[in-house]
Amino acid sequence: MYLNGDPYAQPYFTIRGTVELRQYHDPLRWIPDPNGIASEEILTREPKVADLIQFNLWRQDGLPDMYLEHSFWYYKKYRNWFVDRSSKKERAEYWLQFSKNILLHEGGDPIPNMASVEELPKLEEWLRAREPFLKARFHETMQRHNVEYITEEEMKREGYIPHS
């Protein structure tokens, strides 16, 4: 686990694992697949990091990467507010992703009732009001696990902040 990022975005926290997968064209050859969080495998080997899993790809400022964008997208997909209609199963998955993105399972004010996509400003207001809670949970968890943040000097050196 470490803070990662690119020069065009804020540094973010990531926790990753490597899973061995069998290739389809050669059933006797196994190849490593470094993509993805591999949460089940990580939890099997390191159960003490269970509370860190939910913060995979959260920015150093304590919010999920692309917080508003992802929240709007998952919520609109859940509500079926796109032209391409989703099945009930897909909509349930979108709700799960939306809920995980904002730690809905940890409580807070209820989501505002919205009848149409035109009422999305209510959702944005609600999401912004939730930011202090999310930031506090992120920082508490990082502190509990002694995860160090990248310093402003390191951010400038790596190109996250323009040099003055």
Image (tube, grey):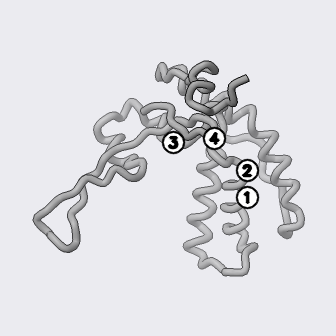
Q: Nearer the viewer, residue 155 or 36?
A: 155
Q: Residues within 10 Å of mark 3 (few under 14, many from 20)?
A: many
Give the CA separation, mark 4 to mark 3: 15 Å
Judge from the rendering whether residue 128 lies leftward or rightward of residue 46; answer left or right.
Answer: right
Q: Which mark is residue 68?
A: 2
Q: Earlier in the sequence, mark 1 or mark 3?
A: 3
Q: Is residue 120 left or right of residue 99?
A: right
- Residue holding disc 3: 56
- Residue lying furthest front in this view? 164
Task: Tell me the quarter of the picture where residue 77 sits.
Answer: bottom right
Give the foreground label among 4 and 2.
Answer: 4
Q: Are marks 1 and 2 in contact (CB under 8 Å)?
A: yes
Q: Amino acid at mark 3?
A: Asn
Residue type of the residue flagged with mark 4: Ala
Q: Secondary structure at mark 4?
A: loop
**In the image, residue 57 above or below residue 94:** above
Residue 134: x %, y % from top left: 68, 36
Q: Is residue 96 above or below residue 7?
A: below
Mark 4 or 3 closer to N-term? 4
Quarter of the image containing the N terminus? top left
Q: Nearer the viewer, mark 1 or mark 4?
A: 4
Q: CA distance from mark 1 to mark 4?
A: 20 Å
- Give the residue displayed 18% in from the left and 58% down from the top: 30
The spot of residue 3 in percent (x, y) is 50, 32
In the picture, measured across the screen, residue 40 lies left or right of residue 144, that is left
Instruction: Identify the residue position indicated by label 4 in the image.
Output: 9
The amino acid at mark 2 is Leu
> In the image, residue 118 lies at what x, y percent?
89, 66
